Image (tube, grey):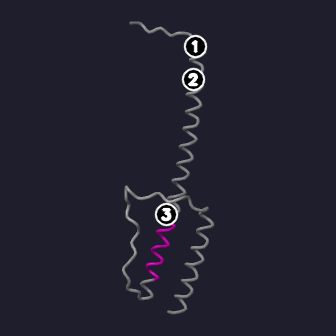
Amino acid sequence: MPETTAPPTELTSQYAAQVTGDLERNVKEQERITADIASLQQQLAALQHDHTVLVNMRQALGITEAPAEPAAKSENAAVPSPRQKASAARGGKQRAVCKLKSQVTGLV
């Protein structure tokens, strides 16, 4: 059965415009999600670094409490509410770590 190509109709033009718009929105959403993932990966790396520093500081202080391990990945984990901007939240943690470090070096 030979295929015939009908001339573009108004309906075809509407569909084409809709598909083009959908593709543009899809690409923008992919870019946004990719940027969010990159930001979250940076935040995770910073938290893991802080965890290592704090564990080392605890060991230097001779604290023998049960270690707090990083949270295990869970498929049923609840999704937390959105946080403040990373720079604001991170600044407070950095100050606390620096203060703790200065206290530890004063003890040693």
Q: Is residue 93 left or right of residue 68?
A: right
Can you tell which mark lies on residue 60? none
Q: Is residue 78 left or right of residue 28?
A: left
Membership of 38 in magenta stretch: no
Return the x and y of residue 103 as percentages of the image width and height: 55, 88
Label 1 Cα crowd, 10 Å radius (few <14 / some 14-19 / many 20+): few
Does the residue at mark 1 contact the one at mark 2 (Cβ under 8 Å)? yes
Can you tell which mark lies on residue 44? 3
Residue designated by label 2: 16
- Note whether 76 is above or below 6 in the view shown: below
Residue designated by label 1: 8
Which quadrant would the N terminus be assigned to in this image? Answer: top left
Q: Amino acid at mark 2?
A: Ala
**Element at label 3:** helix
How many angstroms separate mark 1 from mark 3 (CA)?
Answer: 51 Å
* Residue in the picture at 49% in, 64% down: 45
Label 3 Cα crowd, 10 Å radius (few <14 / some 14-19 / many 20+): few
Q: Earlier in the sequence, mark 3 or mark 2?
A: 2
Q: Amino acid at mark 1?
A: Pro
Please report the bounds of the magenta region as a residue range: 46-57
- Note whether 63 is above or below 21 in the view shown: below
Return the x and y of residue 88 as percentages of the image width and height: 63, 67
Observer-nearest of 26 and 42: 26
